[in-house]
Image (spheres, grey):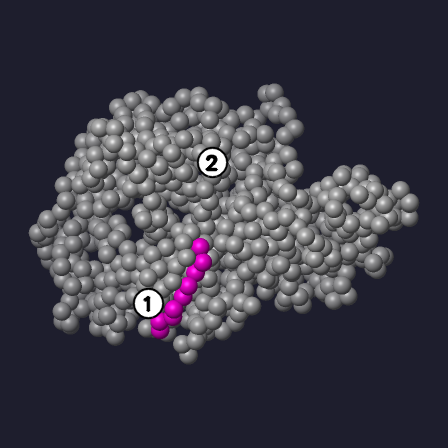
């Protein structure tokens, strides 16, 4: 074996300056740091022609457009091979929590910006400081135009890898060359210390190894003293050969080596970050789905001449992607940094809402909204005087167009309010003239006597719309399934929910079709656990030290009608109050929950607990563009919009049945499973940006995470043991990307009352995750995702053009569709795949 300090060994040293654009500082200071670091790095490159400086994050280069002379020098350094753009993404994001489609946009906007500003793209994926990586990431990196991946976390004490250099195999089978660096920072005065550690980190069978050097976190990069020390050590016979190089140069050197293959996740680091700062998580989820929905409807409206708002949507995506930087989305930044993040994500949501509404209005302009083809004299008319005021409609009732952003048909509850409807009459019809069950609700305003709010279940075509109409006529209640509600019980044809009188949770969840109680304890119970860890949760593997339970329940029926019934449970724990609404629908298996939590418990965490009565459990949860099965051992894990336990349940006679229970959510990312018990962490309250070993001062006043009111929605999906057959990912998409509507007046039009722009056939485990206009033309890009882990083949039909498609398990497939009815398979960069 070669001596670890032999000159026959070569360490390839790459200059680097890790810059958190936001962390213990705000983005303004981040901008200042990037500017100063770029200047320093350029100076060192001019002094050292053999040195290469690697830097990621397209957003930081975009900042430097405000400093054109500096950016010109960077581009010149790239051209002469001394500056290496790496990463290829907009920022170094938190990849456990971002939606898979958001990671696709990290690549799309990142690589396009690299090419526009620097004249070349990145080849090497680069996430040295992100807090863990899902098993689906190799495919996402490869589709980003990257052929290798450099990371640091989780560290050697957190994961057992076969080697720091290996081929990483993703959930879909994609492989990418991966290297785990020992560290991404070094001392400003010398490199000896970091090199000593790296000598031991080198795989003993390799004669070439990699090291990064330079001051980081708050920028800085290589210093004169560190470079001088590097040259001094290289001249010494007691050190290996130290060669300045690029990341790509090192990786090209070792590509021919025989390397082990590792399949699975690269976890865990900083488990507390999965739940830290609930509001950034909620806004992130909302913004992701709002933008995806806006794009789909903008494409749908293109058929009537609506001009796709590419510039607005790109701006919104870039704002969202910036706020997926790992120290922002992970919840580990200072409190004031989140004021900026919330404002920026508010701008994202505002843009998405405006685009969505404009697209719906453009379509509504062209839909024939007349009743039976009859013309009307007035499009806003006062129909009749009904006591204190007039009843007003839009010509012949109020037409309502409901838009479905999903690639599949939907049965979905929709709530609508009308104006100037001072009458008890409210008849709802679909586009075929059939009566639709409708239930009046309390208006949002206390002055809402003339603004009735109502709910109904809409049946919607795939990626399209359907016309419904409200009429000032008495309605005949259609026959519906039994739905009953009392403070102790909710029941329909599918389920019976019995409430615990003290905790307000579910004492039982009875599957009436199979006579099974799916709970082994109180479900949807809000429990409080001790959490003495820092913001990152360093050292914590679980959050299960029970302190108490929200209790003292007040149970009341707040809705009961022909469409749905809701029981509200109000409970308390110490200084905190929780209000949970449990809803069942007539003729639907949907079980919906809504939690309003007013939380005031520092150094504790709140968890919704669902103990499923199952044995032989398999625990599965969503990850970015895929799913993963993990041990049901109680450890805190990153999840996205759904998690599931499946196994075997016994009925009262002791007969075993395959069964399962899924929990869906609209903005939570932290959960654990122990046996059949699922826990969704809904709030954590350490001090903002508290990093061990820093100690909190006695008597000092600190700001704690998640104090105050937060709102979230969840849903339960009991099933017969197969979450795929229950279409859990599809239901989670419905929860997070609901249908939208616009009210319209009565007029003729060229479009029918119901229309589907796109649909899938023979692809039961495939979803349409994105439909957008291509970045460089009028083509349409459609992204499909196989979510069930099963190969699928079938047909995609778009605007009457049918395309045969096939997907391998967990594949993400992009198609670029031209107006000439040509389909091309493309990657995240919207370019033909090799």
Q: Mark 1 points at which residue?
A: 757
Q: What stretch is highlighted in magenta?
A: 801-809
Q: In this view, does 672 lie above or below 722?
A: above
- Judging by the rendered image, the residue that carries numbered circle 2 is 631
For the residue labelled by badge 2, is the local secondary structure a helix, a strand or a loop?
Answer: loop
Query: Residue 625 bears which disc, if any?
Result: none
| Residue 31 pos. (x, y %) | 66, 52
Q: Nearer the viewer, residue 392 or 777?
A: 777
Residue drawn 16% across the image and 51% down it: 437
Of tags 1 and 2, which is closer to the observer?
Answer: 2
Q: In this view, does 831 lie to the left or right of 447?
A: right
Instruction: Provide residue 215's location: percent of width, then percent of height.
Output: 75, 45
Please tell me which residue lies in front, 85 or 8.
8
Determine crowd level at label 2: few under 14, some 14-19, many 20+ residues with C-alpha closer than 10 A. some
Q: Does the magenta stretch include residue 807?
A: yes
Percent from the top left, x then y, of residue 177?
63, 54
Look at the picture and state if 490 lies above or below 49.
above
Task: List x then y, in percent, for residue 87.
Answer: 63, 55
State left or right for residue 623 relative to residue 89.
left
Confirm whether the magenta stretch covers residue 73.
no
Instruction: Classify residue 122 by image quadrant.
Output: bottom right
Q: What residue appears at the point 17 percent right and 65 percent down from the top-left corner? A: 395
């Amino acid at each position: 074996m070669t001596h670890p300090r032999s000159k026959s060994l070569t360490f390839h040293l790459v200059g680097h300056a890790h810059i958190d654009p936001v962390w213990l500082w705000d983005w303004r200071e981040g901008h200042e740091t990037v500017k100063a670091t770029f200047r320093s790095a350029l100076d060192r490159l001019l002094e050292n022609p053999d040195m290469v400086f690697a830097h990621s994050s397209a957003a930081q280069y975009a900042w430097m457009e405000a400093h054109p002379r500096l950016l010109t020098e960077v581009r010149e350094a790239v051209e002469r091979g001394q500056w290496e753009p790496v990463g290829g993404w907009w920022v170094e994001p938190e990849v456990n929590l971002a939606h898979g489609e958001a990671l696709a946009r990290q690549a799309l906007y990142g690589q396009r910006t690299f090419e526009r500003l620097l004249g070349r793209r990145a080849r090497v994926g680069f996430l040295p400081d992100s807090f863990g990586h899902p098993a689906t990431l190799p495919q996402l990196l490869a589709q980003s135009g990257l052929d290798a991946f450099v990371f640091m976390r989780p560290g050697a004490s957190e994961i057992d890898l076969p080697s720091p250099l290996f081929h990483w195999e993703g959930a879909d089978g994609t492989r990418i060359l991966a290297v785990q660096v020992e560290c991404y920072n070094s001392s400003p005065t010398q490199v000896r210390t970091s090199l000593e550690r790296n000598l031991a980190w080198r795989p003993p069978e390799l004669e070439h190894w990699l090291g990064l050097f330079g001051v980081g976190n708050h920028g800085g990069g290589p210093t004169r003293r560190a470079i001088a020390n590097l040259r001094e050590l290289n001249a010494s016979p007691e050190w290996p050969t130290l060669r300045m190089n690029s990341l790509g140069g090192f990786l090209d050197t070792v590509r021919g080596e025989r390397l082990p293959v590792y399949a699975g996740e690269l976890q865990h680091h900083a488990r507390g970050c999965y739940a830290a700062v609930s509001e950034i998580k909620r806004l992130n989820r909302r913004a992701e789905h709002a933008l995806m929905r806006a794009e789909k409807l903008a494409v749908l409206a293109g058929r009537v001449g609506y001009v796709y708002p590419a510039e607005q949507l790109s701006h919104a995506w870039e704002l969202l992607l910036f706020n997926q930087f790992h120290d922002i989305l992970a919840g580990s930044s200072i409190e004031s940094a989140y004021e900026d993040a919330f404002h920026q994500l508010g701008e994202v949501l505002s843009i998405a809402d405006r685009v969505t509404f404009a697209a719906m209005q453009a379509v509504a302009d062209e839909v024939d909204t007349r009743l039976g083809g009859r013309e009307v004299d007035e499009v806003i008319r006062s129909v009749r005087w009904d006591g204190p005021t007039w009843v007003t409609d839009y010509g012949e009732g109020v037409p309502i167009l409901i838009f479905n952003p999903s690639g599949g048909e939907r049965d979905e509850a929709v709530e609508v309010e009308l104006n100037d409807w001072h009458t008890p009459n409210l008849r709802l019809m679909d586009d075929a003239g059939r009566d639709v069950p409708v239930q009046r609700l309390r208006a949002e305003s206390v002055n809402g006597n003339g603004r009735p709010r109502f709910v109904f279940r809409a049946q919607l075509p795939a990626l399209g719309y359907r016309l419904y109409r409200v009429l000032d006529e008495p309605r005949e209640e259609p026959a519906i399934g039994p739905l009953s509600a009392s403070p102790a019980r909710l029941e329909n044809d599918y389920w019976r929910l019995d409430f615990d009188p003290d905790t307000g949770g579910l004492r039982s969840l009875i599957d009436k079709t199979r006579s099974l109680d799916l709970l082994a304890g109180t479900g949807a119970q809000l429990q409080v656990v001790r959490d003495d860890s820092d913001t990152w949760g360093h050292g914590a593997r679980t959050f299960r030290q029970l302190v108490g339970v929200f209790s003292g329940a007040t149970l009341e029926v707040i809705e009961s009608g022909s469409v749905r019934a809701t029981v509200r449970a109000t409970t308390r724990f110490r200084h905190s109050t929780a209000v949970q609404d449990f809803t069942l629908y007539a003729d639907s298996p949907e079980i919906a929950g809504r939690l309003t939590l007013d939380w005031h418990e520092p150094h504790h965490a709140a968890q919704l607990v669902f103990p499923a009565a199952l044995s032989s459990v398999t625990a599965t949860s969503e990850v970015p563009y895929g799913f993963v099965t993990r041990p049901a051992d109680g450890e805190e894990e990153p999840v996205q919009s759904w998690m599931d336990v499946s196994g075997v349940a016994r009925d009262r006679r002791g007969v075993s049945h395959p069964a399962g229970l899924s929990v869906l959510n609209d903005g939570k990312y932290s959960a654990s499973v122990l046996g059949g018990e699922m826990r969704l962490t809904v709030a954590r309250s350490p001090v903002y940006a508290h990093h061990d070993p820093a100690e909190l001062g006695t008597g000092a006043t600190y700001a704690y995470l998640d104090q105050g009111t937060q709102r979230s929605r969840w849903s339960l999906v009991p099933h017969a043991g197969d979450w795929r057959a229950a279409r859990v990912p599809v239901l989670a998409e419905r929860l997070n990307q609901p249908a939208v509507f616009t009210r319209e007046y009565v007029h003729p039009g060229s479009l029918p009352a119901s229309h589907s722009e796109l649909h899938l056939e023979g692809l039961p485990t495939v979803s349409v995750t994105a439909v957008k206009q291509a970045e460089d033309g009028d083509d349409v890009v459609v992204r499909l995702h196989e979510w069930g882990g099963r190969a699928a083949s079938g047909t995609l039909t778009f605007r009457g053009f049918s395309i045969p498609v096939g997907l391998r398990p967990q594949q993400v497939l992009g198609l670029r569709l031209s107006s000439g009815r040509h389909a091309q398979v493309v990657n995240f960069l919207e370019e033909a795949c090799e």
